[in-house]
Amino acid sequence: MIEVEHLTKRYGGHVAVDDISFTVQDGCIYGLLGPNGAGKSTTMNIITGYLSATAGTVKVDGHDIAAEPMQAKACIGYLPEQPPLYQDMTVQEYLLFVAELKGERKKVARAASVEKAAARAGLQGMERRLIRNLSKGYRQRVGIAAALLGAPKVIILDEPTVGLDPAQMIEIRALIHDLGKTHTVILSSHILSEVQAICDRVLIIAHGKLIAQGTPEELAGRLAARGTISATAQGSREAVLAAAAAVPGLSDLRVTAEKGGEVSFTAVSEAGTDLRGALSLALAQAGCPVLTLSAETMSLEDVFLQLTETPAADPAPQADAAQTPAAEEPAPTEPAPDDAETPATAPAAQNPASAVEDSAPAQSAPAAAEETAPAQQDTPATPEPMQEKGDAPHGSDL
């Protein structure tokens, strides 16, 4: 139904979506799972034609969203994170308006399609209510009803339960599950339990990249079987981490506490392996006595958090890089006053040799410099001798 190949979106130097590829099969509910800012909404906006991709292609029911936008968009019903509702309209007025925009010209047919969509979204009895007077949950229902108009094959929902109370979330989830019986549904969310409860397949996105995909059961079986080892050992930070890093099968070492010559850390072990014995032996051989050691199985939520947070562990080099130019900034500030008065004085200040060549004898250069300084302060006529120098035309060109 939907084919996404090598999708990339850049904003200047920032990569919002980085070479994502996946296929959405007909009749399934797909969940785009990831933290806020992961690239979920950008991906959805490209699929629906609201944004153009920097690179890559999107095909909806065989139609390229860039080459055949009208045919592709006709297959899609879209609910953005903030539904574009007109607050002064009633529910019925708004849905009739949307139906007409989607090409339903006949009044009787338009009314019938609106009635059907409103019933499907659970809006019975709300048709004559002003949208401004509706709760957040019912506004989401109005947005879903609008997405259903036009008989689309695909329903795309961006964060459909954000801002809802628990009761409203349960109702919207039940509605989405019901829509999945007759439509292909794609929804985005940063709530793991929501995706697990609704979706047939899950795509995990972090930092613009697709890092895992499969059914919730497949992801749980493939990833959640990994174990976390928590340990505390005596010794220096370098010695403890070096000994732990040498144990085959351990990865993602993270220091959680360090105090009084004791280092606490966590590590991830490969699926189906218990590396506590190997870790204890490695630490003992390195002269780092083990004080505590425990293991626990990772849940799918733990794995998700670890997968989405791993690339964010590099801020230290960026901080160092940011500090480097700061140390170099004072150097160019010295000629700044000269630049502020006349651009031509900057080359003269940086190249004293050229100033000597342009003036008369070399011995009188210091005296001339002393006389020039007060002259610039007392009289505005000083630009004239400066313009006679060979540097002045070059400065004016700048």
Image (tube, rainbow, N blue to C red):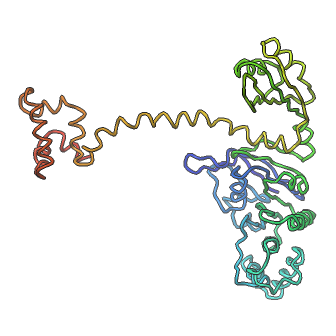
- Residue 30: x, y in percent? 84, 54
Q: Which residue: 90% across, 59% down?
A: 27
Q: Which residue: 82% across, 19% down?
A: 247
Q: Which residue: 9% across, 27% down?
A: 362
Q: Is residue 79 above or below residue 23?
A: below
**In front: 297, or 105?**
297
Location of residue 305 (image quadrant):
top right
**In front: 181, or 143?**
143
Q: Quadrant of the N terminus?
A: bottom right
Q: Is residue 374 shown left or right of residue 281?
A: left
Q: Is residue 358 shown left or right of residue 229?
A: left
Q: Which residue: 68% across, 36% down?
A: 313
**In front: 363, or 20?**
363
- Residue 60: x, y in percent? 77, 59
Location of residue 182 (image quadrant):
bottom right
Q: Is residue 363 shown left or right of residue 221?
A: left
- Residue 304: x, y in percent? 81, 43
Location of residue 369 (image quadrant):
top left
